[in-house]
Image: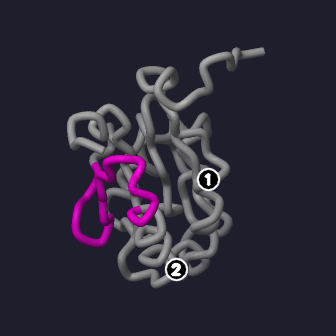
Amino acid sequence: MALNKKKHMEVRFIYNSNQIKERKTLAYIKSLDKHYINEVDIYKQTLTERQLAELAGKLNVHVGELLDEESEFYKDNLTDSQLETNDILVLIKNNPDILKTPIVEYGKSADFVGSAYDFNNIDLEFESNKDELSNRDEKDN
């Protein structure tokens, strides 16, 4: 598939390269070869407060739900905390390990990915290539 066609099917994959499971998920997604994968490794690339807020909007969750409650930082420092939205955004920006990852972002939507195979359940086929991928007589219900 040509790169320009894949560009219309771009997927932003946000992950933490310190987590082996997330690196395996990235490898699996890359092997599908259906989409152009834009990798964002939070260990190497910091997301801004604005990017984090927009991500929460695409995920359709409150900013607080971006926090990984399983992370050591969260368990040690935030378990019973009541934080304002701005405080959470700054906290994640300064401590990216507490961002719940991996996250796949496509078009105007995003989803948390629990395992590499969850990616198969996420509808990533964009309207721009729907005709190419569907059967001639197939219709939406």
Report the mark closest to the observer, 2 or 1: 2
Q: Residue at x 46, y 51 (%)?
A: 88
First in sequence, mark 2 or 1: give its number: 2
**Is 101 placed left or right of 52 in the picture?**
right
Q: Residue at x 36, y 76 (%)?
A: 17
Residue 68 in which image quadrant: bottom right
- Mark 2: amino acid: Lys
**31 part of magenta stretch:** yes
Q: Residue at x 71, y 16 (%)?
A: 140
Magenta segment boundaries in residue numbering: 30-47
Q: Position of residue 64 (x, y in %)?
A: 58, 49
**Is 34 placed left or right of 111 in the picture?**
left
- Mark 1: amino acid: Gln
Q: Name the residue tied to disc 1.
A: 82
Q: Residue at x 56, y 80 (%)?
A: 76
Q: Nearer the viewer, residue 95 or 128?
A: 128
Secondary structure state at the residue bearing disc 2: helix
Q: Name the residue tied to disc 2.
A: 21
